[in-house]
Amino acid sequence: MSLPSRKNIQAQSCKEFTGITLKDPAAYAAGLTGVKVALEHTFKEMGVIKSFQTLSHMNQKDGFDCPGCAWPDPENRSKLGEYCENGAKALAEEATSKIVDEEFFSNYSVQEISSWSDYKIGKSGRLVAPMILKPNSNYYEACTWEEAFRVISDHLHALASPDEAIFYTSGRSSNEAAFLYGLFVRAFGTNNMPDCSNMCHESSGVGLSETLGIGKGSVKLEDFDKAEVVIVIGQNPGTNHPRMLSALEKCKSNGGKIICINPLQEAGLIRFRNPQALSGMLLNGHGLTDIFLQVKINQDVALLKLIQKKLAALDKVNSKVFDHEFIEKYTEGYESLLAHLDKHTEKELLELCGVDEKLIDEAVALLAEKNKIIICWAMGLTQHKNGVANVKECVNLLLLKGSLGKPGAGTCPVRGHSNVQGDRTVGIMHYVSKELNAAIKKTFGFDAPDHEGVDVVKAIPAMYEGKAKVFVALGGNFGSAASDTEYTAKALQNCDLTVQISTKLNRSHLITGKTALILPTLGRSEKDVKDGEQRHFTVENSMGIVHQSKGFLAPISKEIKSEPEIVAGIASAYFKENHSVNWDELGSDYELLREKLGEVIASFKDINTKSKGSGFYLPNNVRDLDFSKLPNQRAQFSMTELPIHNLKENEYLLMSIRSHDQFNTTIYGLDDRYRGIHNERRVLFMNEADIAKENLKKMDVVNIMSNYEGQVRKVFQFLVIPYNIPIGNLAAYFPETNPLIPIHQYADKSNTPISKSVRVSIEKA
Ligand SMILES: Nc1nc2c(c(=O)[nH]1)N[C@H]1C(S)=C(S)[C@@H](COP(=O)(O)OP(=O)(O)OC[C@H]3O[C@@H](n4cnc5c(=O)[nH]c(N)nc54)[C@H](O)[C@@H]3O)O[C@H]1N2
Ligand SMILES: Nc1nc2c(c(=O)[nH]1)N[C@H]1C(S)=C(S)[C@@H](COP(=O)(O)OP(=O)(O)OC[C@H]3O[C@@H](n4cnc5c(=O)[nH]c(N)nc54)[C@H](O)[C@@H]3O)O[C@H]1N2
Ligand code: SF4
Ligand SMILES: [Mo]
């Protein structure tokens, strides 16, 4: 039987149902069930003894950093273990003893593997040897590292311009690997460095840089102990940053209040049983949320404007509501902001956001009194056309209250991948930093390119149109994570060469260029040994602390290399001896690599000693109330506009969200326990009124369509689930819904795809 062409292989997960059972959404997060589920995952993948031994090293000062999210570790680490259920799942996924070897690839063609679900593909195991997929072949074959590096070098040399190559980075790479990778890409001659941040917190980076002068958050973990109010907006920490719940719990036990702003009442934010505290195990857990504002999708700007308007009215009566001294001393644009708030009536804003006014008034009364306020957010704010405006409205509120640069207050964009923030700090970006280029010239003696490269949404059309021909990925699963799955698949398939430096098998190894390479690499949890000496890495967490991470487990295979070794292998094959940088030396001697990093980026000076133990904080101008890099040396109020959706009668806004059992495109399991969904991912959360309006009923099967610029995109076979979600709003999981998101629909200024507000309609399947 002849195999279908590689051009026609499945770019999406399969459409079969897996056998759903529905339960009530969970009443609380974590607790004993969380512990049980965490251990089930690790036991299954790693065995009992290895699980306990390895978990006891995770997030400890001399251990390795959790490969899950970027939430920071407390100074005093718990003896009971400093990790959460989803951190344990992330470890289990990486440290599995299953392997994908030469025999696996000779048994299964790429076509066959691509017909499996993402869950099955991921569960196949760890990649253990370099593999090559030759033009017109349907099977990966083993190759040597030398051959792999030579193939890459030959393809890079064959390009008419360095801008015909694209170098993607996902956020799990260490500072060392990312720095070396960025250095090579610049030496090669392009800034084509899209990264997962472009699809993630880019709107935060842009919004914060323009208003406060730094694209990162300002709070430290201990600020949660002192905060009077924490606003959690557009974020689901119970699933995605579970140990943040401990910080919220501590805030509450010190008398703080929590306001949540979300279209969904996420379980983790209602009640929490702290598995690390006996009280949490025995008692009914702590109620976390004091005020829940159930905003409609993408109406946060309306709600935040309304809150500011109501506060401004109170401030007219009692001038202590706003911090006028702070506003006077540090900010610009206050009068314009007040005038701008008058553009819309309270009634108009109230109708748009869809929130109960009584609850808004409660929140306003609380905010009026307090000034130690933290705002935490994630993808619910950033992944919209007006993602940057969403972030700026949060900054407006904090500036009005003087809630910056003091204990218990500040901005807290909660990062996704465990080193996504560090990768950017050490130079992974598509835009030009003159300062960085000058420092590279000084330390390494070459001129880095001074023209902007492509980000994710520009890289894909470049490949689609044949303007880019080589795609290299340092981690991640670009094909599944990016929007417009079918278009992105064609773009990747148009390339002459695609290269994936990965730990685990994923769909991006199957949707490939004419030639494809898989370069297997060490995971966080593994020992990185060279000449009998164990090396370590550094990472930066969501609060700007850089610290070391040292693996514990024996590597899954002797054949795999560390990320810096792979990057150095590519660089030295490309340059041979003809370059001012000694790539092989930098790729093997991490102490030297860090020393050079410290020469190029001043805040990393002495990193070799500073990163030990708890690590060190990178400088943060907001913490110091230094706005000297901004216009008139002041923090900036922003005048934002309301979003426009022009929904037709039969149209909805769809947000693509994470289940409790996934890490982005890695599917840990088929449950979304907190939302009561078991053993199924193809579900569509819908308000009862909308279900009735569409003449549907629970568990009916529907297709979802988006229609942008005259092109209809469709995903098939989703089960309708009645859910507490605002009328007119829908939710379903990513990456299953990515085919709906048009490649050309992304946020103003940050170019982040509109993954949380896609205009769709539905039809019965
Ligand atoms: N276990 C686990 N941990 C993870 C990840 C994972 O997949 N699994 N991913 C990591 C990564 S890379 C990231 S970026 C983070 C993501 O962390 P989150 O941003 O928490 O993840 P999402 O599931 O995308 O959830 C977004 C939340 O925003 C809400 N929301 C959606 N639209 C809107 C809106 O318009 N307004 C408001 N106010 N809320 C809205 C949704 O209801 C949901 O609660 O988590 C990181 N940690
Ligand atoms: N519709 C929709 N789309 C989205 C989102 C959404 O909310 N909705 N979220 C977006 C966001 S926030 C993000 S961050 C992106 C994520 O985009 P990516 O970062 O590209 O995707 P991941 O699923 O995190 O990548 C998982 C793969 O990384 C590899 N990997 C894991 N650990 C390591 C390591 O240590 N080293 C190396 N080299 N490889 C490793 C494994 O092979 C694994 O299969 O997706 C985005 N896409
Ligand atoms: S909160 Fe994040 S970093 Fe911490 S253990 Fe859980 S997944 Fe890992
Ligand atoms: Mo992310």
Image: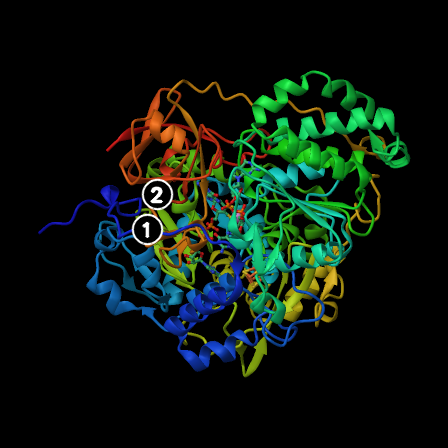
Q: What's under tag 1, amino acid-wise? A: Glu
Secondary structure, mark 2, is: strand
**Label 1, label 2: how many angstroms apart (C-alpha)?**
7 Å
279 left or right of 565 in image = right
SS for callout 1: loop
State the residue in front, 492 or 703.
Answer: 703
Q: Residues within 10 Å of mark 1 (few under 14, many from 20)?
A: some
Residue 563, visible in the rendered structure: no
Residue 683 circle label: 2
104 is higher (above) or lower (below) than 644: below
User: Residue at (44%, 28%) from the top-left corner?
Assistant: 728
Q: Is residue 455 left or right of residue 542?
A: left
User: Which residue is tagged 1?
Assistant: 680
From the viewer's side, name the closer residue of 55 and 451.
Answer: 55
In this figure, what is the number of numbered marks? 2
Whole-percent x, y for residue 57 in the image: 57, 75
Res 529 seen here: yes
Q: Are marks 1 and 2 in contact (CB under 8 Å)?
A: yes
> At 59% from the left edge and 37% from the top edge, which residue is drawn?
452
